[in-house]
């Protein structure tokens, strides 16, 4: 697709962090942490994409780069047909109005000394969304009502420590909505909430996506909630995407062994209807991102690993919208996996 037709796309997004005080630096090439490599994503208004992975998979790096809180090492971000210019202050401010981020811990992101009225007033004033006391109050009340904090007038006077975790997350969402963004990135938005309020907050996001035609990026370690909540799923591991496609397909017909591992460990309320699920035999832990394994990064944990996995597997399509990066999708290599022992972990 040409850039001018693009709503939002990231291509080849990469982030490497230099390793501090690396003693080996004197001896050779400086070491880096490969936090994210070649991340690609396209968003559509009114749809939710879940970025799923365990700790260290790079999913929060995706959130920070897409929110322009950090500058990528490589890659580009195209919004409304234009490539964003990370070094121009005015461009970054305009971008942040379109792309908002809500964080995992709303308490840490809300100033405990300020009232909800002040917290909502700030983005309204800074981005010129409202002016004058009466208009700002009217708009703040509307925002609180949109996130179902009513009676809104009472919530305006409260401070974050007077609110429950779920209410704080709703204030955080209202603040993000204040600038009328087109894209919302929610980084683990329910993982710190009580189980009883998680569903209501997820339902609120779903409502906003439909009503405001928002494009939502839902970042989570929980593939079970992604299955329930998202239209599309991107599965990440050790800084790379391993599988991506429509949520129904990725969760009903997982292709990559890592996706199968995640699903076999996730609770499945429909298990009785579907029958017993195959347990996946993957073992071990995520690799070091300073010296990631050569070839497929999942190789040290994969029970199907074979000689060809010492090379990076290409992305192969299972159908037009669903792809995975695994040599098992190559019929010749799949044949080899049944014949040769797995190479040792690196
Ligand atoms: Fe396993 Fe090889 Fe596929 Fe990686 S490429 S997931 S090691 S079979």
Image (cartoon, rainbow, N blue to C red):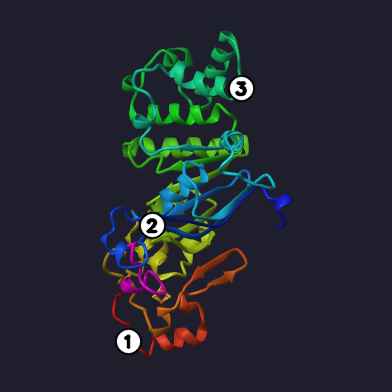
Q: Which residue is mark 1?
A: 341
CA–CA distance in space, label 1 to label 3: 62 Å
Identify the residue at image location x=59%, y=47%.
47
Crowding near the residue tagged with mark 2, few <14, some 14–19, many ≥20 C-alpha atoms within 10 Å = many
| Segment tinted magenta in the rendering | 288-301
Residue reaching furthest front?
A: 26
Q: Is residue 313 magenta?
A: no
> The N terminus appears in which quarter of the rendering?
bottom right
Of the numbered discs 1 and 2, the one sitting upstream in the chain is 2
Identified at 54% across, 67% down, the residue is 323
Q: Cβ(mark 2) to ligand 1 < 8 Å?
A: no
Q: In the image as oriented, which residue stretches furthest toward the bottom?
A: 339
Q: Main secondary structure of the magenta part?
A: loop
Q: Determine which residue is flagged by label 3.
A: 129
Residue at 46% over, 74% down: 312
Label 3 secondary element: loop
- Residue position marked by numbered label 2 in the rendering: 57
Does residue 72 appear left or right of residue 193 in this picture? right
N-terminal of the two: label 3 or label 2? 2
The C terminus lies in which quarter of the figure?
bottom left
x%, y% of residue 32?
Answer: 37, 59
Return the x and y of residue 287 as percentages of the image width and height: 31, 65
């Amino acid at each position: 697709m040409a850039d001018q037709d693009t709503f939002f796309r990231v291509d080849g997004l990469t982030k490497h962090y230099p390793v501090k005080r690396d003693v080996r630096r004197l001896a050779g090439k400086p070491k880096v942490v490969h936090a994210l490599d070649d991340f690609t994503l396209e968003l559509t208004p009114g749809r939710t994409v879940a970025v799923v992975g365990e700790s260290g998979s790079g999913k929060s790096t995706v959130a920070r780069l897409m929110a322009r809180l950090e500058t990528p090492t490589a890659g580009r971000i195209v919004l409304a047909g234009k490539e964003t210019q990370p070094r121009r202050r005015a461009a970054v401010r305009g971008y942040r109005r379109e792309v908002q981020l809500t964080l995992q811990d709303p308490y840490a992101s809300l100033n405990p000394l300020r009232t909800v009225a002040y917290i909502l007033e700030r983005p309204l004033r800074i981005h010129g969304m409202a002016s004058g006391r009466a208009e700002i109050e009217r708009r703040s009340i509307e925002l609180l009502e949109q996130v179902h904090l009513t009676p809104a007038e009472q919530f305006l006077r409260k401070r974050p420590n007077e609110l429950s975790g779920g209410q704080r997350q709703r204030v955080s969402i209202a603040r993000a909505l204040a600038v009328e963004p087109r894209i919302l990135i929610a980084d683990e938005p329910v993982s710190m909430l009580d189980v009883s309020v998680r569903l209501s907050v997820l339902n609120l996001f779903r409502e906003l996506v439909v009503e405001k035609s928002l494009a939502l990026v839902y970042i989570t370690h929980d593939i079970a909630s992604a299955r329930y909540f998202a239209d599309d799923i991107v599965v990440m591991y050790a800084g790379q995407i391993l599988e991506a496609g429509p949520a129904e397909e990725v969760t009903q017909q997982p292709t990559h062994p890592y996706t199968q591992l995640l699903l076999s460990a996730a609770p499945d309320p429909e298990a009785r209807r579907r029958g017993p699920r195959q347990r996946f035999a993957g073992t071990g832990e995520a690799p070091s991102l300073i010296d990631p394994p050569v070839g497929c990064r999942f190789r040290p944990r994969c029970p199907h690993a074979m000689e060809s996995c010492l090379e990076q597997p290409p992305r192969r399509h299972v159908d037009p919208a669903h792809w995975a990066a695994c040599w098992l999708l190559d019929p010749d290599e799949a044949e080899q996996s049944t014949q040769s022992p797995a190479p040792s972990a690196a």
